Amino acid sequence: MAVRLVFRIHAVQRMSERGIRDRDVREVLSIGEIIEEYPDDTPYASRLVLGWCRGRALHVVAAENAEAQETIVITVYHPDPTLWEPGFRQRRRPWNA
């Protein structure tokens, strides 16, 4: 059975502001790389996924509601190179920014 994708209002607003399409998010979630996990997030553990769409890095924060068989998209953004190491897999330490 397929998992349903649910976009939080915050994610939809950010996607609209940043010109990010829902198909970009779907692609990142299907073939992207999990670079951080947040097991203590509530109400569901979440993760940060890195992918590349249309030549740009894209970060998607998503959570799994296994009971409802849905993936919840919390936010989506193009990572800021001043805050992330090259490749956008690791955050810069404050003294490296």
Image (cartoon, grey):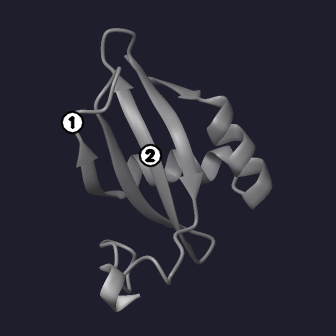
The image quadrant of residue 42 is: top left
- Quick check: can you spot residue 2? no
Residue type, label 1:
Pro
Taking depth in this image into account, of 76 and 4 the one nearest to the observer is 76
From this view, report whether residue 11 is shown above or below residue 57. above
Taking depth in this image into account, of 5 and 16 the one nearest to the observer is 16
Alpha carbon distance from label 1 to label 2: 13 Å
From this view, report whether residue 76 is shown above or below residue 35. above
Which residue is at the far front? 95
First in sequence, mark 1 or 2: give its number.
1
Which residue is at the far bottom? 96
- Residue 86 percent location from the top left of the image: 38, 86
Which residue is at the far top? 67
Residue named by callout 2: 61
Kind of element beneath mark 1? loop
Residue named by callout 1: 39
Residue at 24% across / 47% down in the picture? 37
**The C terminus - image quarter:** bottom left
Residue type, label 2:
Val
Give the class, few, some or many, for how many residues have Cα within 10 Å of label 1's Cα (few <14, many ≥20). Answer: few
The image quadrant of residue 6 is: top right
